[in-house]
Amino acid sequence: MKKLLIALAGAACLLSSVSAAQADQLQDIEKRGVIRIAVPQDFPPFGSVGTDLQPQGMTSIWRAIWRNR
């Protein structure tokens, strides 16, 4: 029981620091005007390379969302 309590306390400490870091990320992205999204390019339909050698799949969806915000 003591180990579980220590593990939960440690997890709570780690998660509390994550929320503070995420607060500024949207503002940083908007300031830069660039969003970086990692998608494997060998896993269609989520990620692939088109005939024009540009990424397709989820990157196309995120690009459309970013343009229409």
Image (spheres, rainbow, N blue to C red):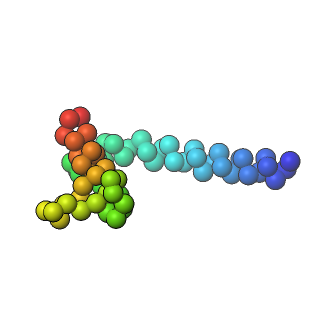
Residue beneath the point at 73% across and 52% down: 7
Rendered location of residue 6, percent (x, y)? 77, 51
| Residue 3: percent from left, percent from top | 81, 53
The residue depicted at 79 percent of the width and 47 percent of the height is 5
Indicate whether 18 appears above or below 42. above
| Direction from residue 2 to residue 43 in the image, left or right | left
The residue depicted at 13 percent of the width and 62 percent of the height is 52
Label count reads 0
Q: Is residue 52 left or right of residue 62?
A: left
Give the residue furthest to the top. Answer: 69
Quadrant location, the C terminus:
top left
Name the side, left or right, on which 28 lies relative to 18: left
The picture places residue 39, in percent across and down from the top left corner, at: 35, 58
Which residue is outermost to the left? 52
| Residue 15 is at least partly visible in this image | yes
Quarter where residue 30 is shown: top left
Residue 38 shows in this picture: no
The residue positioned 51% from the left and 48% from the top of the image is 18
Q: In the image shown, does 48 or 30 lie closer to the viewer?
A: 48
x and y, in percent, of residue 41 in the image: 32, 63
